[in-house]
Image (spheres, coloured by chain):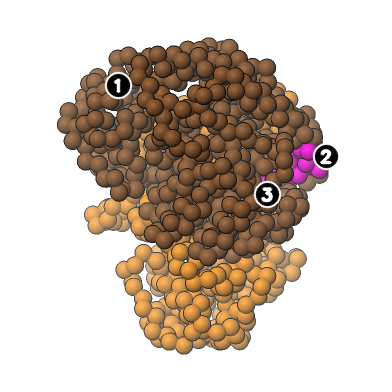
Chain colours: A orange, B brown
Amino acid sequence: MDRSIPLDRAAAAPLYRQIAEDLLASIRSGALVPGERLPATRELAQELGVNRITVQLAYRHLQEEGWIRSHVGQGSFVAASAPDSPTERAARVPPAREAMASSAERRVCTPAVERLFERARTRASWPEVGSDAIDFSGRVPDERLFDVEEFRRAVDRALARRGAELLQYGPPAGDEGLRTWIAERLRSRGIEARASDVLLVNGAQQGLSLVAQSLASSGDQVACERPTYHQALDIFGGLGLRVAGLPLGEQGLSVEHLRELLRAERPRLLYTMPEFQNPTGTTQSAETRRALVEVASLADLPLVEDDFEHELRFRGSAPRPLAALPGARHVVHLGTFSKGLFPGVRVGWIHAAPALLARIAQMKRTLDLGGGTLIQAALGEFVATGAYERHLEVLRHSLAQKHAAAQEALQRHFRGRARWTSPDGGYGLWIELEESVDAPRLQRHAAREGVVYTAGELFYDVPPEHTCLRLSLSRVDRERIEPGLQRLARALDGARRATGSNLPASSMPLL
Amino acid sequence: MDRSIPLDRAAAAPLYRQIAEDLLASIRSGALVPGERLPATRELAQELGVNRITVQLAYRHLQEEGWIRSHVGQGSFVAASAPDSPTERAARVPPAREAMASSAERRVCTPAVERLFERARTRASWPEVGSDAIDFSGRVPDERLFDVEEFRRAVDRALARRGAELLQYGPPAGDEGLRTWIAERLRSRGIEARASDVLLVNGAQQGLSLVAQSLASSGDQVACERPTYHQALDIFGGLGLRVAGLPLGEQGLSVEHLRELLRAERPRLLYTMPEFQNPTGTTQSAETRRALVEVASLADLPLVEDDFEHELRFRGSAPRPLAALPGARHVVHLGTFSKGLFPGVRVGWIHAAPALLARIAQMKRTLDLGGGTLIQAALGEFVATGAYERHLEVLRHSLAQKHAAAQEALQRHFRGRARWTSPDGGYGLWIELEESVDAPRLQRHAAREGVVYTAGELFYDVPPEHTCLRLSLSRVDRERIEPGLQRLARALDGARRATGSNLPASSMPLL
């Protein structure tokens, strides 16, 4: 195998993708044959002069795509062709198709997303993890809290009242009643909003992808927090956009770094999560928000404010959303029912200044002719009963208790070994280990101990400096939080012993 | 006003868009001021050496975008800035935003789509049209035939049976039960299909946009029938794709023209509607289908088969779908519940070979995390009752009668003045006038007579040779079809008289 993979550190694609693509080309061309052993990650990293994590990410990417198989203790091997695996079949498409698809291929992202959600849905479904595993992965609501009966009545009422209208094509911008209710709620937070300023979308994920598609084209740069929502990275990567990560501090993203970026570059938008940021759980301070909107106004930079969990604040008061600050005409505000209520309804919304919203709405109409009005109307019926407020009350109370339990357990088991955030709301929590531990090894040890979390590197566009973990408290019962973190501490012990050497962590401040 | 608009006949953008963009630039720069009268279409067409229709399309485009206003008998004028109109506000964004948005702007499509559906929904809502107008526009189902009660029970049953699961994130590919049912139906038509070969999408419109995004990138060429589904043109335009139109004959699209195209170009996909093509209603012959799949196999060209109305056949038997022919691995098959059942559920599906489907599914996951499982599960319950089959029976019977009435009335009122299709199923019908009549003038006369149709030029990527009309019989009661066509004939008389001169039609065969 020829290991002189040409790496372009200035290119849009992250190094690990460049490595993965090069290996893939070798597999496709037959230079690497089925069953052949790939070099050890350490070895290849040295040879290429890159961080070992970079090679690990490349291998993991190929593994997820079905091109290679990794066996613990044995290494990674080129997969044998298996007729039933879709991804492996792709290897056998004729060369002409190959060339034809090359430009579209740039858009294909890792299916990590799917597995993450599948795992979240089916709970602890890792093969190595027992059914009694404590699952901190998947930042999704606990469906045991869902008021299914009330929603069932709401759907029924909507259909009884409005009948066939809800089964016909509906207004492309979404159900008027629900948009009116959303506009009212936005106004209560100081955001200037009428129903016509609100566009309903199929979840905030579609919201972000529509905004990105409306404002940027392949090759353009977009800015975001580092770390950031992994699915935002997938959207940006899928659209061929280059990502500029801005470091996060305790006050939120670094506006200083943004200013610096703007001196050199021209990002098409900045994606930010001011409340309970994903993955870290931090909240942007009022000062950061003011400065951010000011800079954006001066630079004419659209800010995409993803406000996915603001309803889940259990203490303190929220600074005003970006969309409520002077200069808000540069803000595209994304909301959703997926965290505070039911993800399965696939209803989110976009609020933006009229000209900007018109452009986004046009994109939505072109791509899917609008969402399903029936569910939107049912949500309108549901919220009118007060059931949403009742649900949020329960959720906030439960989260307050869970976060308290988590902080206590972290103090007990991780003091001196890790730094962590202490969010005022939301499902998530972020841990950075003080010492450098091999991330996949830690995950294997955790699985053995019976605890599951989301590996931090998923949220980075470049390999992170520290080993990081995102915990979601949403679907873990309060009394299992302490045992879960104890298991995690034991996994860390195990991974350290196995590693042998514990490199000192750099002295970067937490967030 | 400087009328030397530089036109590039080899460019990707149709001539009318080039003209529209140039005029827009003049408005934005202030070279054309609010209230200023634009040159008459005839005059500008002569000056630019283009067909008058081209200029009319450009003006209509600008009018739809809110940049100009047209007054019958007075001409077109640059719009005054009106603070409440979103599109007009766009004119006042600062120059920096202007430059920033320019690449995204290429993706913005005409909102004709929206208005079409709004019109279809609200029936005959043209300001000039009375409430007793006979509306042949909008190829959408008649909601008076919807079995709302049965669907209401189906939703209720789904929620009662599966509860919270349906309100949580679902499988990204869609509800397993419904996919199994769809796969079974596909198999009954000779298509090799398992549930895992089916991806549920938010309507066939999303299906086509996902396929286009998965297989082609901005600047690429795609092939389709000419005329074709106007919303497909919007998708292609919105993604920055260049369109190559293939002429339609009685046997379907011209495979000879496709072969010729493939000698010179490398389209990324061919979009085709073999059954009851939209807008013409024609069906591809078995020979054309065989030849098409053969050519596609040799050229390694993906065929996108939009099978939206095949359930609505009321006579004869259908040739096998492209997806059931040898070489089907090049076929991406799109299906939908929007024409045969309820558009409002926003559920369609994609069937394709595993490698191809995996790529499309990944695109969908990235862009919106999958559709809503509740409605999919409810559809599964609904079809299991046999209610779908009963609905189709009623629909086919009604369409058979309506088409018969339409053919009779066309013979009576249009013999010698037009040529028209005689479809074996589906909602649509296509009329080409023998004589050249100014299309907007005809539409105005029709509105005055109280009859509404869809103007044929909407379905063309280039201005058509003839004045064409698409009629949809879906929501017109059978006994109003004859009076409707009589009104249309009167409108034609009126438009001819107004025109004064009747240019002889070219001797091109119908379709």
The answer to the question of whether label 2 and label 3 lie on touching residues, with beta carbons closer than 8 A, is no
Q: Which badge, 1 or 2, is on the more N-terminal residue?
A: 1
Residue highlighted by disc 1: B76
Q: Quadrant of residue B311?
A: top right
- Looking at the rendering, the stretch of residues picked out in magenta corresponds to B368-389
Q: For the residue carrying disc 1, how many other residues have a C-alpha within 10 Å: few (<14), some (14-19), or many (20+)?
A: many
Q: Which badge, 3 or 1, is on the more N-terminal residue?
A: 1
From the viewer's perspective, is the residue at label 1 or at label 2 nearer?
1
The answer to the question of whether label 3 and label 1 lie on touching residues, with beta carbons closer than 8 A, is no
Residue highlighted by disc 2: B385
Distance between the alpha carbons at the discs numbered 1 and 2? 56 Å
The three-letter amino acid code for the residue at tag 2 is Thr
Q: Identify the disc placed on residue B377.
A: none
Kindly identify which chain the residue marked by label 1 belongs to. Answer: B
| Magenta residue check for A339 | no
Q: Are marks 1 and 2 on the same chain?
A: yes
- Answer yes or no: is residue B208 visible: no
Residue highlighted by disc 3: B319
Q: Position of residue B91 (x, y in %)?
A: 29, 32
Q: Residue at x 24, y 30 (%)?
A: B46
- Secondary element under disc 1, as helix, strand or loop, is strand
From the viewer's perspective, is the residue at label 3 or at label 1 nearer?
3
Q: Are marks 2 and 3 on the same chain?
A: yes
Q: State which quarter of the image contains the N terminus of chain B.
A: top left
The three-letter amino acid code for the residue at tag 3 is Pro
Q: Position of residue B81 (x, y in %)?
A: 29, 23
Q: Residue at x 41, y 30 (%)?
A: B505
Q: Characterize the magenta stretch by its predominant secondary structure.
A: helix
Camera-nearest residue between A220 and A91: A91
The three-letter amino acid code for the residue at tag 1 is Ser
Distance between the alpha carbons at the discs numbered 3 and 1? 49 Å
- Answer yes or no: is residue A265 visible: yes
